[in-house]
Image (cartoon, coloured by chain):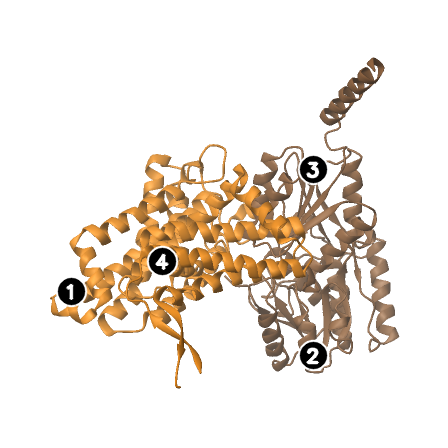
Amino acid sequence: MKALKSKLFFFLVLACFAWGSAAWGKDVKVGFIYVGPVGDGGWTYAHDQGRKHLEKMGVETTYVESVPESDSEKSIRNLARKGYNLIFTTSFGYMDPTLKVAKKFPDTVFMHATGFKTADNMGNYFARMYQARYLVGMVAGAMSKTGIIGVIGSHPIPEILRHINAITLGARSVNPKAVVKVIWVNSWFDPAKEAAGTKSLIDGGADVLTITTDSAAGTQTAAKYGKYSLGNDSDMSIYGKEAHLTANIYNWGVYYEHVYKQVRDGKWKPDSEWWGIETGAIDLAPFGDMVPQSVQDMVMKKKQEMIDKKFVVFEGPIKKQDGSIAVAAGQKLTDSEMLSMKYFVEGVEGVIPK
Amino acid sequence: MIYLTLEKRLNFSTWTRIGISIAAVGIALIIGGIFLFAVGVNPLTAYGMVWNQVFMDYWGWQDLMVKMIPFLLTGIAVAVAAQMKIWNIGAEGQLYLGAVAATWTALQWGDALSGWVMIPVMILAAMFSGAMWAAVPGFLRAQFGVNEIITTLLLNYVAISWVDYLLYGPWRDPGSNNFPVTREFSESAQLPLFGDSSVHLGLILGLVAILIVYFILEKTKIGYQIRVAGDNLFAAQYSGFNIKWLTLAIVMVSGALAGIAGMGEVAGIHFRLKQNFSINYGYTGIIVAWLARNHPLAVIVTAFFMASVFVGGELMQLEFRLPIAMVYLFEGIILFSVLGSEIFAEYKLKFKKVGN
């Protein structure tokens, strides 16, 4: 009996010790905050696929969907309260609330997508989607007959400007006369507006359409009018197989597994991570049957050059919309320049709301 | 033949009304429970969880109070205008303008002034700008009889675009990678919080505003005039009340109250102006006011009720993995049932025999 007691005591001490020292090296329960519904077919769907990847590994996870950015503090805190000690918040507007909650829960790891703030227990992450955007831009440039590519803009923030610019550079690398028309919907998820905007772009002559928003409405609309579409964030071919050329997609599972393991092993550090195409965190969806083999080969070759770091998207000479120099010949944009981009490159027809 | 008819209640007491409302919530919970059961969640477990984690929990109360603040202010804003049968659908826009004014003062003087000066200045600025925004439809209604439902509603979109303009243009924080947010308010321009909670001064402002409105309506001459004008416009005109001024004044007061709500959100929660900082609080205010039958003190109860629907709904999502649609469905059932029960407060159901 006494032996048992001392054994118990020993374990108790050990447990306390483990609790105190290995800050994050305990059972990791992972929570996700989503800005849209998991069934959006795009951005949130892609994150949820990443979450399911963790579940398949046997990790306990949960999520809260459609959390308004301005009301997210309570949702994030609820996850932390309930013992989720690794929390991913997956929209830019969650940055300040995540930081606020992080300060109150020092033993929980917070990872914020698409932002730039860090704290002792908060990091941020994103993927270099602009690389995949360049590749789909090449497909668009090759497949468009009118030379007009239509893009539904969500919010005119650096991320979206960077993506539209990458599409434009990609398209013009194939067809130097191609232009990209932009319509803003000022929303991340508004299928009705996305569909109406896509229709307007089609009326304006665009025959390859894509979006920077989160839903599949753009692909559905393009299919309805017999135009081509590029899916965004997830493979959207089920929403219009005859329209879907390819898509720039996220494979968040690769990244989430990495973070999960770091936290589990107590190796996690607050950092800003920006994974590129070489990690597999971003990729292209399978090409549609209508994309000729020669185009597919050209795009895959470029992708390999990106993986091998032989090709960089934002390398000069690149001109701005007004003809002035954005990137001088031989120069490459730094990460911080890309993260604060606030101009359109030559070839974009559209204005940045001021 | 037996017909089901409605018969007007000759005398209905406040207690009848309250009783019917409570019954309506009960019925909504039963209907909602059936849906919960259908998706495989035991309704009793679910309600028990909400009870424990929202009403019996420090964090839950904190969330409730924070959520309740904008509802108190937009609710009373809509209710006060409704005293004269004026429907202010524009609380959302007035809230935005209040936030803009508060932000302007914070960016302008936040570094120079202490909190003791700064916060009253912000409150007054928010009230003034909310009132002026409401004054436009108020004047059009008072002078030309223009339908305020349309004008107040449309001005909301103008207000939101105006905020977008400021955020993408002159007020954009250069330190935020060009994201459309203003810079963070300095400490003196942040509303004080209760203890270590997230509940900010707005709670007091909301409750005090409601008490003042109640006092003015019930105890002053102008309040009496407003109530008469609301009951019978012609009677009020014959009594020589200046209806135009009353109309303009009450709409402006309504705008000022909604303006405070906007200030509370930016200065009490976000500490900066950003897009979509209001989650339709102005529109939810309409529901809050309607549930309260536009009675100022009842707004406190209905604002609390709406806050619990939102907070509880989210917890159910988290705890039982319910899809968000289920939460919306739930909120819809509760509102439908409570607003629908209204008819039973004024009428009773009667079975009538006709013929033979």
Q: Colour of chain A?
A: brown
Chain letter for the residue marked with disc 2 in the picture: A
| Picture quadrant of residue A232 | bottom right
Q: Residue at x 73, y 54 (%)?
A: A128
Q: Residue at x 58, y 49 (%)?
A: B47
| Picture quadrant of residue B231 | bottom left
- State the SS at label 3: loop
Question: Does residue B252 appear anywhere in the picture?
Answer: yes
State the separation of the CA atoms marked 3 and 1.
65 Å
Residue A12 image offset from top left, x and y in percent = 76, 21
Give the residue at mark 3: A270
Q: Which mark is residue A207?
A: 2
Quadrant, the N terminus of chain A: top right
Q: Residue at x 59, y 46 (%)?
A: B48
State the separation of the CA atoms marked 2 and 3.
44 Å
Q: Which mark is residue B242?
A: 1
Give the residue at mark 4: B16
Q: Residues within 10 Å of mark 3 (few under 14, many from 20)?
A: some
